[in-house]
């Protein structure tokens, strides 16, 4: 759904809120990593990417969808398929989404330190790349 002109100020405020939330969530993910809580750190790393992707979707004037899969799809449509951002970022988001699913719903699953480091590194790169592509410093 395209956002109307009357919503531009509202959209900008939402974009800023998503960017701030992404940064705060990423910082919290690193704190959880330092405390050896790899399950929570991995999940939060995904959410940092998810919030950044929502900011990017809003930046093109589209209301973010209500589902995680919808966000993945629209991010790919408006940024990866158009060449605005490297395709690896869509892969980072998808992989982090998969890990979040496991960490949230499979209580017996173990999230390794190595996987968490990769997810955190990808999340940091993703958040920075989205900030750059949407010209938000």
Image (spheres, grey):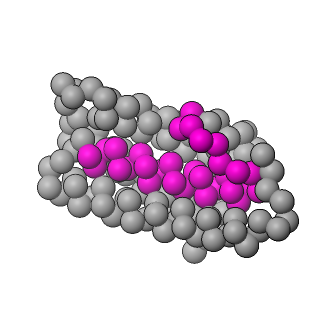
Nearer to the camera, 61 or 110:
61
Q: Main secondary structure of the magenta part?
A: helix
Residue pictured at 24% horizontal, 41% vertical: 39
Residue pictured at 69% horizontal, 65% vertical: 11
> Would you identify the image quadrant in which residue 71 lies?
top right
Q: Which residues are magenta?
A: 40-69
Residue 5: tell me if it is visible. yes
Q: Residue furthest front?
A: 6
Residue pictured at 34% horizontal, 44% vertical: 43
- Residue 108 place in picture, x, y as percent: 18, 25
Q: Is residue 34 inside the magenta stretch? A: no
Nearer to the camera, 14 or 92:
14
> Would you identify the image quadrant in which residue 9 lies?
bottom right
Residue pictured at 44% horizontal, 36% vertical: 97
- Number of marks in picture: 0
Residue 122: tell me if it is visible. no
- Residue 118 place in picture, x, y as percent: 33, 44
- Residue 74 place in picture, x, y as percent: 67, 41
Q: Is residue 114 above or below residue 28?
A: above
- Residue 89 place in picture, x, y as percent: 55, 44
Is 81 displayed left or right of 71 in the figure?
right
- Quadrant including the C terminus: bottom right
Q: Is residue 68 inside the magenta stretch? A: yes
Is 105 displayed left or right of 74 in the figure?
left
> Would you identify the image quadrant in which residue 6 lies?
bottom right
Q: Residue furthest left?
A: 35
């Amino acid at each position: 759904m395209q956002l109307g002109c009357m919503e531009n100020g509202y959209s900008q405020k939402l974009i800023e809120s998503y960017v701030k939330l992404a940064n705060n969530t990423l910082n919290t993910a690193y704190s959880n990593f330092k405390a050896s809580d790899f399950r929570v750190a991995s999940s939060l790393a995904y959410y940092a990417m998810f919030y950044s992707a929502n900011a990017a979707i809003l930046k093109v004037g589209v209301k973010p969808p209500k589902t995680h899969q919808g966000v993945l799809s629209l991010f790919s449509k408006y940024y990866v398929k158009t060449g605005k951002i490297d395709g690896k970022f869509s892969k980072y988001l998808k992989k982090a989404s998969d890990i979040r699913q496991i960490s949230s719903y499979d209580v017996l699953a173990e999230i390794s330190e190595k996987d968490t480091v990769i997810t955190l590194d990808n999340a940091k790169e993703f958040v920075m790349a989205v900030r750059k592509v949407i010209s938000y410093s």
